[in-house]
Amino acid sequence: MASFFTALPKTLTLPLPLTLVLGSKSKPNPKKASPMEGQKPTSRKPRKPSYGASRRSVLKKSFNQEQVMFTAPLSDDPSVAIIGGGMAGLTCALYLEKRGVRSTVFDTGIHGLGGRMGTRVIDPQPLIFDHAAQFFTVGDPRFAQLVDEWLEKGLIRQWQGMIGELEVGGHFNSLPSLPPRYIGVNGMRPLADSILSQTTLVDVVRPCWISKLDPFNGMWHLSENGKPQGQYDAIVIAHNGKCANRLLALSGLPLVARQMKKLELSSIWALLAAFEDPLPIPFEGAFVKGVDSISWMANNTKKLLHLQNSGPHCWTFFSTAAFGKRNKVPQENIPTVTAEKVKEAMLAGVETALGLSAGSLNRPFYTRVQLWGAALPTNTPGIPCIFDPHGRAGICGDWLMGSSLESAFLSGMALANHIADYFQSGGARPDEFAVGLHAEFQPLEGHDIGQFPGLGSKKMDEAQPYQLSI
């Protein structure tokens, strides 16, 4: 993996010339402690965070903070805190274990782990929706090994249903069957549970919102709203967006914070809709072209319950990134009027895409809208991971290489092996382990719902066009 990495220059130009040096793990003398050595974490109730803070104020805090410089020896049995339990974070934990390193995964998920590998089941019907990642493809042999294991366990199968591109008016072009497209047999979330089932050195804490990172006495001390959540030799940030930026803003990791701040993310609305009768559509999934409010639509019932011939018909619709940006609201508290507006606009978009007259689409008996406020990256540094050896902190995530499940896997694996190598060195040569701290970002191309390695590599003249009869 070394060929992917960029080296850290010997001379760093930081916003402030000061460094926060954290040395011996012995108990500090409070009478002689320098104000530069960091303060012991306190359980006092912290000041209420300013969630209304502007991007400019968070940027200023991120870039003007002092750099943590750990000099204390690593523990004999070092451990890593991984903040984020999506594909990248779980893969990082798995591969740290393969190298004999303990870790704890902190995740905010109430219903389960997996991040964008999300499947929602609504009882008592039940209704089932893949409401995030819709399917995935394989391009890298290392990811292929994990996919083969999932196939052997019966967790995934090839999606044989017809998918393609749908243009305004019902003009549909089916895509070639290669490369194979994979889906979770019972949705995507069980894949996350499968990764954890292979581990014995991984602890999971959820739901948990890590709100503060304190460097003290050669270790990282984590807390959730003043409640201590343990101390660790290194930390991994395996999520992104505003929460990650706020967490890093006062962490003592200005180089890591600066790279995270360069990331630009799209916003996507998801509409989950269940219909009593099947829609008169022959395909199971389609990338929608030319409709402002819809970029993707998929029949969950056919995809996940392909042998079921009766019962509700569950569809997932995704908006375009432009529509998501224009209608963005706080995703934790979506106003009712916005939810209704988005639902109606997206259903109208479905009619436009299918060539139906306004109001002729059968009304769904169940609907739910969800905003993915930090959905997918629109730019990338094109590297597997980021690691600051002086602060013993790293970043992994699909956005570092693309926007696919495969990218997330490769990033988590790369950072795990890099941290394990760093631990193995004893931390004596930190500059040799600096990765990606100055990498430049480039625009990222792909579908509004992500990248699919190999998909679309064939010319569209190999597709099968025809007009929907509705």
Image: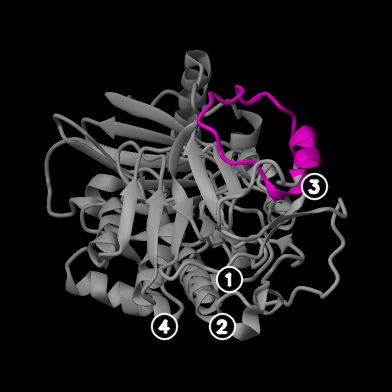
In the picture, which quadrant includes the N terminus?
bottom right
Observer able to see residue 313: yes
Task: In this rendered view, identify the residue nearer to me: 392 or 395.
Answer: 392
Query: For the residues marked 2 and 1, what is the alpha-carbon distance in whole angstroms?
Result: 8 Å
Query: For the residues marked 4 and 1, what is the alpha-carbon distance in whole angstroms?
Result: 16 Å
Residue stretch in magenta: 35-61
What secondary structure is found at the residue carrying circle 1?
loop
Q: Residue at x 58, y 71 (%)?
A: 384
Determine whether 286 is above or below 99 in the image.
Answer: above
Marks 2 & 1, CB-CB < 8 Å contact:
yes
Q: Which residue is mark 3?
A: 63
Q: Which residue is mark 1?
A: 384
- Dot 4 or dot 1, earlier in sequence: 4
Q: Quadrant of residue 124?
A: top left
Q: Amino acid at mark 2?
A: Met
- Dot 2 or dot 1, earlier in sequence: 2
Q: Which residue is mark 4?
A: 141
Q: Which residue is mark 2?
A: 1
Q: Main secondary structure of the magenta part?
A: loop
For mark 1, does the 10 Å Cα neighbourhood hold few (<14), some (14 to 19), or many (20 or more) residues? Answer: many
